[in-house]
Image (tube, rainbow, N blue to C red):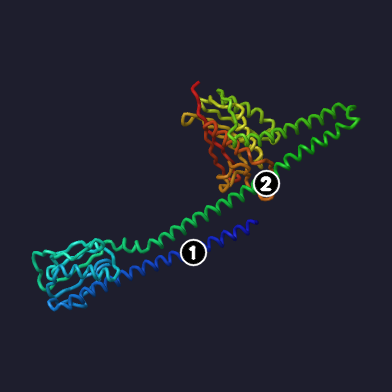
Amino acid sequence: MTRAAIRNIILLAFISLAGIIATQLFWIKKAIDLKEQQFNHRAYVALKSVADRLVLDTKYRVQLDGINKKASNYYTLEFSSPVNVTMLENYLVIESKNQNLNADFEYGIFECTTDSFYYGRYVNIKKTGEIERLKVKAKPSENYYIGVLFPKKKTYLQDDLNLLIFFSAVLLVVIGFFTYTILVILKQKKLSEIKTDFVNNMTHEFKTPISTISLSCDVLMRDDITKNPERLKHYATIISEENKRLKSQVESVLQVSQIESHKIALNYSEVNMHALIENIAKNIKPRLDKQNGHIQLHLYAQKHIVLGDEVHLTNILYNLLDNAIKYCDKIPEISITTVNKHKGIEIAVKDNGKGIETSSHSMIFEKFFRVPSGNIHDVKGFGLGLFYVKNMIKLHKGKIALHSVPTVGTTFTIWFHTIEK
């Protein structure tokens, strides 16, 4: 499947999910609004029924238009004559149940003139049983009102919406799973592309020395080659060099395999990092000389003895220097600086090469990853060098950091614990 096809599928899938989410949110809001309207209507009808019941009793005069909504969960009912408190509470409970308004409420009786509290209490609608006669010490004046508060209105509405909330939660889980699946697919596709690129590179890298060895062997098999010792030595040298090259490439793949299987064993010893750096710089200088390049050493660290595997520490620095030379499109200028920091030694390898785009920084230490360069493959490799470097530094309980600016250069900073010496 092509990138464009995957991109279109993902785009359509996210549009569909966005539509589902928008629809779900719309219906949740509609449901909440409907429940709110139903609650308000039931509360009003219940209070209106209470008023109607009281009107049937000739002892009471109730203002039928006196039902007011003061807040989202607070209503008032105005009276112009005293009312039996026991009967009032009984009517409130009965009419609430009749309207399926199974929500706890508080009611209070207040005098209109002074707005002073006369009587009231909290009613648990689920625990109401037989009517009990309430003992009220005094009677209010003729003008008073009753306030009815539903303190648990939000909980009541939420209970009715639990099923909708559950399905919304399920939808979120599905969206999360879908997003995770898409990310896994993209990651697997990228890994597939990287591995395909690795196989192509490896095939090319192996094919070249094998072809060279094959040609050299053909020359050495000629009868007249023994008559020209210099020529014989020349082709034998070519075979030897190409054999070393193949061996190095195979070892790099095997090292990665050992790292991943955790079978690599480190031979620890005390390593003088300054001496190691100087030796590596000396060995790599002929290669730099061919390109008129230079390497400068600024070895300022006072403590530079590290407990580690000298072979692998050498490979770490060699890989960094090898990249500094390979990925330089001008005369190579390399510097290695050491300082003591955080009870260890910090080694900075700086070059003036092509640099690395910020978008590739997070992937630069991944296995098989190579910085994208379009269709230009002027630098050969498997994309294993920095993967090896990162993991080997990790095995040495060290750290590595990258700072790079395209066209300016790259600095790799590594840190290891030092020991007293």
Residue 311 spot, x, y in % from top left: 62, 27
Q: Residue at x 52, y 33 (%)?
A: 398
Question: Is residue 205 toward the left or the right of residue 304 in the image?
Answer: right
Q: Nearer the viewer, mark 1 or mark 2?
A: 1
Residue 246 spot, x, y in % from top left: 72, 35
Q: Residue at x 52, y 28 (%)?
A: 300
Q: In the rendered structure, find residue 20 and report the number of the disc placed on it.
A: 1
Residue 387 lies, with reference to residue 88, above or below; the image says above
Outermost residue, top side: 421
Residue 133 lies, with reference to residue 414, above or below; the image says below
Amino acid type indicated by mark 1: Ile
Which of 105/86 is in front? Answer: 86
Circle 1 Cα neighbour tier, 10 Å, few/some/many (<14 / 14–19 / ≥20):
some
Question: Is residue 265 toward the left or the right of residue 100 in the image?
Answer: right
Q: CA distance from mark 1 to mark 2?
A: 39 Å
Which element type, helix, strand or loop, lies under badge 1?
A: helix
Please name the residue that numbered disc 2 is placed on: 197
Residue 129 lies, with reference to residue 346, above or below; the image says below
Which element type, helix, strand or loop, lies under badge 2?
A: helix
Viewer can see residue 117: no
Residue 21 lies, with reference to residue 308, above or below; the image says below
Question: Is residue 273 toward the left or the right of residue 128 in the image?
Answer: right
Question: Is residue 59 toward the left or the right of residue 312 in the image?
Answer: left
Which quadrant of the figure has residue 93? bottom left
Which of 181/200 is in front? Answer: 181
Outermost residue, left side: 138
Circle 2 Cα neighbour tier, 10 Å, few/some/many (<14 / 14–19 / ≥20):
some
Q: In the rendered structure, find residue 45 and report the number of the disc placed on it.
A: none
Amino acid type indicated by mark 2: Asp
